Structure formats: structure tokens, C-alpha cells
Image (spheres, rainbow, N blue to C red):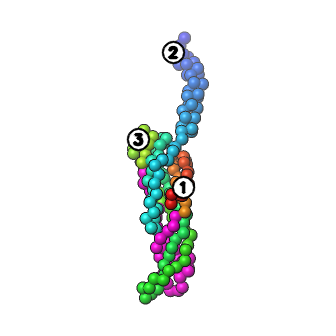
Amino acid sequence: MHLTTLLTSTRRALRPFAVLTLVAVTATVAFAAVRLSRTSFTDEGTTLSSCGRLTGLGNQDVTIVMSTTGAASTSCTNPGGNNPPGQQVPVSPSGSTTIPSTQIKNGSLSFCVETIAPSVTAEEAGCPRPFTAQVTDVQFETATMTVMQGGEVVLSQTFDPSR
């Protein structure tokens, strides 16, 4: 038998095995469960920070987004510098961090993420003209952690950060 014919026959014979191997590897990755543990939240007044540990990750960069809901306490500042209280205003601050794959060790990663302080308009805070508004505190009600890897959401979990 000619060498070229032998190689072609061998490739054809191995093709189904290569497809099965690819399906098995893809299934393993698809069913890998990313988990979030040791999650803690710290209310820092107008921002919320969270630290935790992810397990079950692959070998690509990880982006963690923390989206929150809450009620902001506000104050109004008049041109004379006085600060009467404003109204409670619903806010949804968020924050994110991207961590390079080089920091993932054996599928695990520790992280911290913090929201950006929200801002409100004088109108939203119920301040009369020509007052300006400032957020003085946020009572955080929910925090949703969304973890993305390889352009796909691999975990989304909502917490009560006050617990």
C-alpha cells in the first residue's frame, strides 16, 4: 500500500474519534460549575465593596461586575453653604474589575470589587433652585455579582449585602 493512501485511510478512520474527543472536552467545559464563596460585603457609606473567592474557573481573563440597588440619603446645598436634608432617592450604583488569567490558580481566584459612588441631580433630591444635591449615604438593598469569562456569563448571584 502506498504511504499517501495509508495516511489518508488512517485520517478517515480517526476522524470519528477526534469528533468524540472534541465533544467530550466541550461538554466538560460546559458543565464546569463556577462557584462563589467566602463573600463579604462592606458598606462604606456611599459605596459598597465585596470580596470573595471564585472556584471552577477556566484559563481566561475574568470580569466581575457588582450591580446594586438602594436608597440614597441626600443633602441640598444652597449658595450660602447651608445643607438642609434632601429626599431619599433610589439609586443603582455598580462597579467592576477584570482580573488576568495569570492570577487564576488551579481554577480558583480571590477578588475584591467596589461600586462607584452614585450622584443625583438637585431635582431628584427635591432641592429647590439654585441648590445642588449631594449623596451622603446609601442604604444598599441588593447586590448582584455577575462573573464573565471568555465573553460569557458563567455565574450570576444576588445577595442581601446587609446580612
Disc ID at residue 102 = none
What's the CA distance linking mark 2 and mark 3? 45 Å
What's the CA distance linking mark 1 and mark 2? 64 Å
Counting residues from the N terminus, which is met first, the one under dot 2 or under dot 3? 2
Q: Amino acid at mark 3?
A: Lys
Specify which label sits upstream in the sequence, 1 or 2: 2
Q: Can the viewer see residue 97? A: no
Give the residue number, with chain letter if any, for mark 2: 3
User: Which residue is located at x 55 percent, y 51 percent?
Assistant: 156
Q: What crowding class fits label 3: few (fewer than 14 Cα within 10 Å), some (14-19), or many (20 or more)?
A: few
Q: Which residue is mark 1?
A: 159
Q: Nearer the viewer, mark 2 or mark 3?
A: 3
Question: For the N terminus, which image quadrant?
Answer: top right
Q: Dot 1, how many residues are within 10 Å of its Cα: few (below 14), some (14-19), or many (20+)?
A: some
Q: How far across and how far down the image is residue 113, in percent?
A: 44, 56
- State which region is magenta: 111-140
Q: Nearer the viewer, mark 1 or mark 2?
A: 1
Q: Earlier in the sequence, mark 1 or mark 3?
A: 3
Q: Is residue 146 above or below residue 32?
A: below
- Residue lying farthest to the bottom in this orientation: 80
Residue drawn 45% across and 63% down? 43
Disc 1, SS: strand
The tally of labels here is 3
For the residues labelled 1 and 3, say whether their Cβ atoms are less than 8 Å apart: no
Q: Residue 78: where, in percent of width, then height?
A: 46, 86
Q: Secondary structure at mark 3?
A: loop
Where residue 142 appears, as percent x and y from the top left, is 55, 60
Residue type at the position of mark 2 = Leu
Label 1 vs label 3, nearer the camera: 1
Is 155 colored magenta in this rendering?
no
**Residue position for label 3:** 105
Residue drawn 42% across the image and 85% down it: 81
